[in-house]
Image (tube, rainbow, N blue to C red):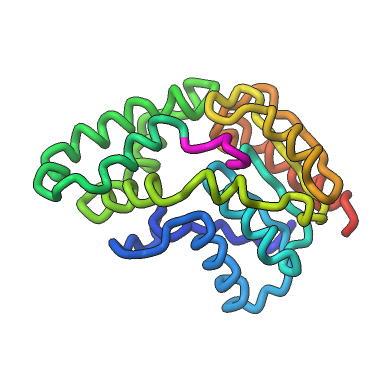
Amino acid sequence: NFQTYAIDMLGYGKSDKPLEADYTWTGQANRLAKFMDALGIKKANIVGHDQGGGVTLIFCSKYPEKVSRYISANGCTYDYCLPIVVRAFGTLKDMPEDILERFHPFILGFWWALLPSLTVYKEQSMPTHIINEYMRPWEGKEGLRALINVASQPSLAELLAVDLSKIKVPTLAMWAIKDRLLSIEAAYRLQKDMGGPVTIEILDNAGHFWQEDEPDRGAEIIKKFILNTPV
């Protein structure tokens, strides 16, 4: 239905993972603006999930002229983000390389074991081969350092500094109600604080990674919002 770009932010997925780079949410938001400029995209519907929610929220406040509609799909807002497990990875940033290399298998094994219980509501939504795909970008020395960078550099202060009243585009807060990491309270606060209309849609049987638990339902809600919401 739409021309869609699913972006691996710097440090994530198949994107580069330079050791010295700006991995803050603000830095990623600025990078997204440059991505759109490079492709000649004047305006777009912006969707953010998890840390991508923090990035896109800042993006919408800094570059409102580039946004048609905004969708926060269990995205980081206010201080609803950076749970203790993520902050724990961030504390490894000053660990010497030799010690970090020695503990690398333990660190990834810990994350591998936690991922399903933290992110999905239905156990069958996260089989072993899917867990392995999520873990693959963090393998190797470069991957581990990227994991530490994206865990340590973003700051809740970045989100708390956003003036939500300046974001006036139509917004969808699509929330998986079984999310163990980000409370539905964030969606209702957005509805009160955003400068434009905010629609709330609930995914009843999905966890934080709703795209694994209820991908079709989530896609249908987003599609309906875009098609039926004038700008």
Q: Quadrant of the C terminus?
A: bottom right
Apparent side of residue 139 relative to residue 205 in the rendered image (left or right): left
Reply above or below: 52 against 65. Answer: above
**Where residue 194 sits: x, y (%)?**
78, 46
Report x, y in % for residue 109: 25, 31
95 is higher (above) or lower (below) than 217: below
Observer-nearest residue: 163 or 93? 163
The front one of 159 and 76 is 159
The image quadrant of residue 174 is: top right
For the image, the number of numbered tags is 0
Residue displayed at 34% across by 38% down? 132
Q: Does residue 153 lie above or below 125 as drawn?
A: below
The magenta segment is 76-82
Where does the N terminus fall, quadrant-wise?
A: bottom right
**Residue 71 horizontal/vertical position (percent):** 71, 48
Q: Quadrant of residue 191?
A: top right
In front of the other: 203 or 123:
203
Q: Position of residue 39 (x, y in %)?
A: 60, 76
Verify whether residue 147 appears in magenta.
no
Q: Is the magenta region chiefly helix, strand or loop?
A: loop
Q: For the point 38% across and 35% down, which residue is it? A: 131
